[in-house]
Image (cartoon, rainbow, N blue to C red):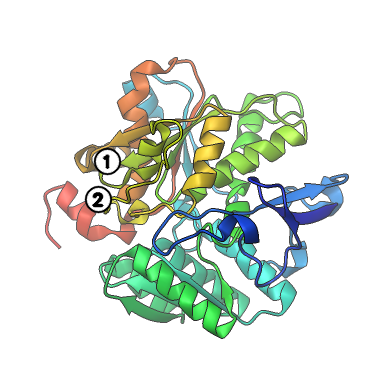
Amino acid sequence: MKWNYRCPSCGKEYAIEPGRYLCDPCSASNMPGKALHGVLECVWTGRYDSSKDGAIPLPVQAEFFPPIPVGDTPLWAPERLRVELGFPRLFLKDDTCNPSGSFKDRASYLVAAFAREKGVKEIALASTGNAASSMAAVGAAAGLKITVFLPASAPVAKRIQVLQYGAELREIQGNYDLAFDKSLEYSTATGVLSRNTAYNPLTIEGKKTVSFEIAASLRTLAGSGPKAKAPDHVFVPTGDGVIIAGVFRGFEDLMKLGAIDKMPTIWAAQAEGSSAIARAMAAPAGSDPFEPTIAATTAADSISVDAPRNGYYALAKLKKYSGKAVMVSDEEIFAAQRLVSAKSGLFTEPSSACAFAGFYKVRRTIDPTATVVVMLTGSGLKDIKNAAKAVGASV
């Protein structure tokens, strides 16, 4: 098997090595605070041997992954929600079980493994909170220095996680977009590895592992045959577009391997106050779908971005595979958070609950016999302040 970075826009290929992030010609027009052109993806060619290359094809050898149990998270069968909503094949993919309580550990795990393979000692990144606490946790296990740029408004639980894991925290008096630009200034000036979401292609590649797990779990539940099973619908909480891009990449690989026969209908669930990708889906042909940039206003901090850095890449995948988008209000997000908690026992933060709110909003347009997976990507304990508001409590 051979691995490379490839630009899906122009087809140019690059070696997977430190310091390579974007496609040179396609990224030449990028501007600070805007969605990124020239986002690369990891591609492999040759024969894939799962016994030698691992259960999931990844561009780093297994011995470099740090000793921390990332992934293999449970797929819940929420009986009470199934009965109440009339969806007997509804599943919840619970990534709150990852070490830092967040789906972002999947990307951090691969980035850390790459750093160890290449002898890199420090990783820098911007985050609204989850990627920061995630990289700090995985970095602690890997023996790496982690420097994070985090808006001062990020939930206190996520800031404390960063400090507990021993990372260097640089608070930014501004939003995620400013933190992103500040972190790039730092990594460019120092030469350390950037883990910035979308900017580093490995952040997309690491997240594809969830698709393999979903397909494997559904095959096990089906109880027959060696072939994996694709769900009919997957609902993904979406901010900058990297998680949903990773979900697409995973199912693309499964189709390439002949493990599944179809691409699921993948839904980008967005808060109304941070809905650039959903709006872009409806943009007229010939226009820039991410202009103008609109300031994000949502309590779902983990998916609150002004300019989705992976917007163009995610939008291309959504259009290629007939994906869909749904926007929900913060009130619908909080209602979904309470519903999932009270009827399944799974407590998620608002950004995760956005995915369930999206499913709830469009459920009557979906065949009730369909297999539906809702991705729940962060623990509710990460944002107690908003969770308390949702139930009328004070903290």
Q: Amino acid at mark 2?
A: Thr
Label 1, label 2: how far apart the Cα atoms are: 8 Å
Instruction: From the image, tell me which residue sits under label 1.
Output: 272
Which quarter of the picture shows residue 394? bottom left
* Percent of width and height locating residue 76: 48, 37
- Label 2 SS: loop
Nearer the observer, 174 or 104: 174
Crowding at label 1, few (<14), some or many (≥20) Cα neighbours within 10 Å? Answer: some
Q: Is residue 370 visible?
A: yes
Does residue 185 appear to the left or right of 218 in the view shown?
left
Q: Position of residue 212 (x, y in %)?
A: 65, 41
Residues at marks 1 and 2 touching, judged by CB atoms closer than 8 Å: yes
Q: Earlier in the sequence, mark 1 or mark 2?
A: 1
Left or right of 184: which side holds 305?
left
Residue shown at the point (47%, 47%) measured from the top left = 311
* Numbered tag placed on residue 298 in the rendering: 2
* Residue located at (61% from left, 47% from top): 208
Task: Let me know if residue 23 appears in the view.
Answer: no
Q: Is residue 72 above or below residue 27?
A: above
